[in-house]
Image (tube, helix red, strand yellow):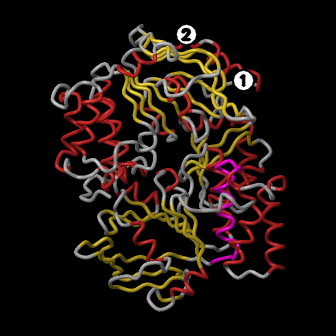
Amino acid sequence: MPMLDINDNIKWTSEKEMNPSLMVNAALSAEISIQVKNLVKVYGKDKTIAVDDVSFNVGKGELFGLIGPDGAGKTSIFRMLTTLLLPEGGSATVNGNDVVKDYKKIRKSVGYMPGKFSLYQDLSIEENLNFFATIFGTTLEENYDLIRDIYIQIEPFKKRRAGKLSGGMKQKLALCCALIHKPTVLFLDEPTTGVDPVSRREFWEMLKRLKAQNITILVSTPYMDEANMCDRIALIQKGKILSIDTPAEIINAYPDILYKIKADNIYHLYLHLNEFQYTKSCFAFGEMLHVSFTKNMEEVQSELLNYLNQRGHQNVSMDLVIPTIEDCFIKLLSN
Amino acid sequence: MREIVIKTENLSKRFGTFTAVNEINFEVYKGEIFGFLGANGAGKTTAMRMLCGLSTPSSGSATIAGFDIFRDTDKIKKNIGYMSQKFSLYENLTVLENIHFFGGIYGLSNQQLKEKSEVLVNKLGLYQEVNKLVSSLPLGWKQKLSFSVAILHEPKIVFLDEPTGGVDPVTRRQFWDLIYEASDSGMTIFVTTHYMDEAEYCNRICIMVDGSISALDSAPNLKLKFKANSMDEVFYALARGAKRGE
């Protein structure tokens, strides 16, 4: 495979940013649930740009992920789409309703689970649910089907105050409350942050079942490995979208050939590979290093092995590896 | 024989009738990166608090950096470092003030503080920021500074309680570069994390379920044993049966 030069890499990201309308997955319904056009959010006197000209569409029934670290602008996007914050530029619609003009319609039809636990700590599980049901003019019974799978897991504790629940149970209660009025679009802002891997996995199972009921879901996460659970994802950093596509296509578009390399002393291997003259990138991934080179492997192999032998590395093993979403994110950050 | 810096024997902690930590036994070696994992409520924090000399065990015994966990808690505190994402630095103090404050607490002299601050600021590339409030730093820098401050007094062991949440993958790796470097110099790293790929950076991993140790081995051995492709699968296999919430 010929090496792509840096210009190709830049093109690789910006092409997709420019054409959000092309990004709707043909396999999904053509109907658009969320449309975001050149959205901008600026904060404070020093005009910090939190959301910088962001555009994307989410199809009806799609599970769409915003993937990025703290400070990427994920929460600002959520708050603008749920009509809790006004944008400084651009526009957005949810179910065809404008986030500024039609905010009342949007509030009735969407469910929102903020990143920070926002239910009433002094009310019990049952009281919180009834409270939110009443606000939306419905009852727990009316839409019970939608929340049953989730609710039965916390029902044994329904008399317990929300403030006394474990992280995993709070998360389930918050999801129930966000679903109580049968929303057509669900906004979940970092629902799995700080939750252990078992609860995280269970949570994604719940989202899959909700998606099967044709609910559109916009979810954000800092965990790159959760990207694969989404139909499509936007990788986001410092207010800008780096790439939008299906996880498989984002991985397909990774421009380099990637190798996983390990040896007995992985830290020294890491230091040495970073100094090797043909190393393009080298990052730790679990017990392996993921490494790309500026030359083809045939050209570089003997020199590489000599280089590592001279530095006393034992049990060096190397193999091709398929990039992960995290590899792609790192690559996009380096552009 | 590798030097042992943490050794626990049947270490337990009970709160009333609830056994938070149930007879745990393990050893951690000098220079090792030791991963301590468990679902929410498994007893990790309680165990870690005992090891740091902050909570008296109900039964069992342990030595930390050669000091007894019952009798020598003050000496333990002087010989360990601690960092957590939740509490790390004082946001309303500057970078330099934080370094001096924490260094001072650990008994470094003014001369030592001056020298070490310089080395640290140089290493982290924080020249422009020394007199800025910590609250103005990006999260990734706070985490790196927080770790560096925690090891300023050159402790034998540093405890890291979920140190790296919420930062981008490159920044997270820069943080781990610091951990590797410390370990390479002979410091022992005891770390809890929810990132399973980070667990794989550890030399050995201990997984707690419902107050007991369910597994303790290197990542490759654990994956082999549980016929799993990733630590995530190993963790899931062990922790999905957990009875306890938080």
Q: Which residue is drawn at 61% across and 21% down?
A: A54
User: What percent of the width, then of the height, locates residue B70?
Assistant: 44, 88
Front label number (1 vs 2): 2
Q: Residue at x 58, y 42 (%)?
A: A70
Residue B144 lies within the magenta run: yes
User: What percent of the width, then of the height, locates residue A152?
Assistant: 18, 41
Which image quarter holds the N terminus of chain B?
A: bottom right
Considering the numbered disc 1 on the image, is that residue within a helix, a strand or a loop? helix
Q: Could you say which is closer to the camera, residue B124 or residue B213?
A: B124
Q: Can residue A322 be seen in this view?
A: no
Q: Could you say which is closer to the camera, residue A135 or residue A258?
A: A135
Q: Which residue is drawn at 50% across and 55% down?
A: B200
Q: Could you say which is closer to the camera, residue A114 or residue A239?
A: A114
Q: Could you say which is closer to the camera, residue B160 or residue B2?
A: B160
Considering the numbered disc 2 on the image, is that residue within a helix, a strand or a loop? helix
Q: Quadrant of residue B239?
A: bottom left
**Label 1, label 2: how far apart the Cα atoms are:** 18 Å
Name the residue carrying label 1.
A10
Tell me the amino acid under the disc marked 2.
Leu
Q: Can residue A173 be seen in this view?
A: yes
Tell me the amino acid under the disc marked 1.
Ile
The residue furthest bottom is B71
Judge left or right: residue A76 versus residue A31.
right
Q: Quadrant of residue A299?
A: top right
User: What percent of the width, then of the height, locates residue B222?
Assistant: 40, 59
Which image quarter holds the C terminus of chain B?
A: bottom left
In the image, residue B130 sits, relative to residue A17, either above or below, namely below
Dominant SS in magenta: helix
Name the residue carrying label 2.
A22
What chain does badge 2 belong to? A
The residue furthest top is A30
